[in-house]
Image (tube, coloured by chain):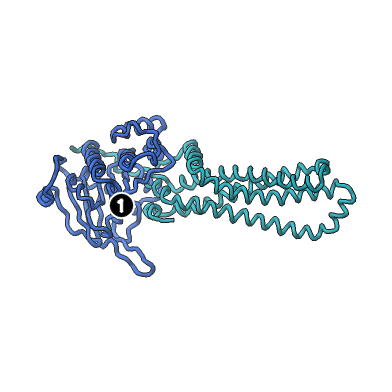
Chain colours: A blue, B cyan
Amino acid sequence: MPKEAIVRTIGLKKTFLLGKIPLHVLKGIDIEIYRGEYISIMGPSGSGKTTLFNMIGGLDKPTDGKVYIDEVDIAQLDAYELAWLRCRKIGYIFQTFNLIPVMTALENVMLPMIFGGMENDEAMNKAKGLLETVGLGARLHHKPFELSGGQQQRVAIARALANDPAIILADEPTGNLDLKTGKEIINLLKEMNKDKEVSIITATHDLKMLDVSDRVIWIRDGMIERIEDRENLQIKVGEVEGEEAG
Amino acid sequence: MHSEVPEKKKIGKLLKLPLNHAFNMSIRSIRIRFGRSIIVTSSIVLGIAFLMSILSSNAFIMGIMEKGPENLKIALQQNLEEMRSRQIWLVSLSLLVCVVGIVNAMLMAVTERSREIGTMKCLGALDRFIVELFLLESSMQGLAGSIIGVIIGASATIFIYLLRYQGLIWSIFPWEPLLKYSAFSILLGIIISVIGAIYPAYVSAKLEPAEAIRREV
C-alpha cells in the first residue's frame, strides 16, 4: 500500500519567552503522518503535546522548522490560504469543546460550511446529517449550555467533519469527560476515521486512546521519545477490548 | 482503502461571510448576552444622556436669548460670558466621559470573548469576518444606546426648564437645534462604540488562533 504523508514536520522547534528566559517547548520534531492514520501523541503534561498540536494545525507559528500539510509548506501561505486550510483541510476538536455559545448545535456545525461558501439549505442538510451520524439528531436546536459535555464534544466532532477535512486534530478530546463518555467519544472518532478515511491526530494522555491508535508518538521534554506501532502496543498495554485493527 | 483525492492538493482562497448571517449572529449574540449587553449599552446611554442634556440645555438658553422676554434676557446676559466658558468645559467633559465609558465597556466585552474569536479562526474565519461581526454588533448597541440616551438626556433637560420657566419654554422651544444635537449625539455614540469595539476585536483577530484561545481575561 503506498503511504502518502498528509502531515510532515521537519526540525520543528518552538520557543516561548517567559519574561526574558527562553523556554524551549519543542526541540526539533520530525514526524510523518500518513493519510487515513489514527495517531496519538502521548506524553506527560508540559511535554509539548498541545504546542505540537497547534503547530500541525497551523494555529501557531513555529520558531524554526517546517510543517507540510499535504505537501504544502504552511509557512508559505498567506492569511487567506491559511484560513482556507483551517476551514477545508483540518477539523479541530478541543478539550474544552469551544462551541460558539450563542449558536445552536446545528448552527455550530453549519458555521464552517458557511465560511466555506456553501449555500444555506445545503449546509443545513449536511449539518443535520452529520449531527445524526454522531447521535444528536434529536438535539439540533439546543444551545451548547443545554447539552452535556459528551454531547458538546459530539457537536464538536460533527463540526470538525463539516467540510470533509483530510485531517482531524483533537487536543485532549476526552480530557473533560468521564470514563464512559470518553470511551464513547474515542469510539466515535475511530468510526469516523474508518468510515470517512480521515486522518485523526490526537494529543492526549488518555490511555484508552491507545486501543484505537495505529501509531503512538511519545513525547517527552519537547523531543520524540519513541514511536510505536499498534501491534507492539497491544502486548504492552495488555487489555484491549474488541476493536479490530482498521 | 485508499480513495483518490487529487484536486485536494491545491489551496484555495474563497471564504465568505454573507451579510445576513453576520447580521443574525450579531443580533443573537446581543440577545444571548443580554445582561452583559445591557451593561455595555447603559454605559453608552449614560454618556450620551449626559452629553445630550448639556447640549439641549444650551439650546434652551440660546432660544431664550433669541425669543424670550426682555427681563429674562437681561438676567441671562449678565452671566452669559461666565456661562459660555462653563458650557464649553461641561460639553468637553461630557464628551470625555462618554468616550471613556463606551470604549471601556466595549474593550471588556470584546476581550472576554477572545476564545470565541480564536475558535472562529480555527473554523476558517478571516480576520475581516471577526472585525465585521464586532462592528455590526457594536454599531447596533451604539445606535440603541444613543437613541435611549438622547431621549433621556433631552427629556431631563426639558423637565428642568419646564420647572424653571413653566409655559415659557413652549414659545421658545428650540426644535431645530434640539434635532440637530440629537442627530449629532446619536452619530457620535455609534462612532465611539464602533471605535471602542474595533480596536480590541482587531487585536484579538490578529492573534494566532492558539494564542486567542489560550488568552485568559
In the depicted view, which residue is nearer to us: A117 or A137?
A137
Residue extending farthest bottom? A20
Q: Quadrant of residue B158?
A: top right
**Left or right placement of residue A58 versus residue A235 in this view:** right
Residue extending farthest front? B163
Q: Which residue is drawn at 85% across and 46% down?
A: B67
- Residue A198 seen by the camera: no
Q: Is residue A15 above or below residue B66?
A: below
Indicate the position of residue B57 as horizontal and vertical percent values: 75, 50
In the depicted view, which residue is nearer to us: A25 or B106?
B106
In the depicted view, which residue is nearer to us: A182 or B13?
A182
Q: Tag 1: Cα neighbours inside 10 Å, few (<14), some, or many (≥20)?
A: some
Indicate the position of residue B47 as horizontal and vertical percent values: 63, 51
Indicate the position of residue B108 as horizontal and vertical percent values: 50, 53
Q: In this view, does B84 lie above or below A189?
A: below
Q: Which quadrant holds the N terminus of chain A?
A: top left
Q: Name the residue under label 1.
A: A73
Instruction: Specify the amino acid type for callout 1.
Output: Asp
- Element at label 1: strand
**Left or right placement of residue B44 versus residue B26 in this view:** right
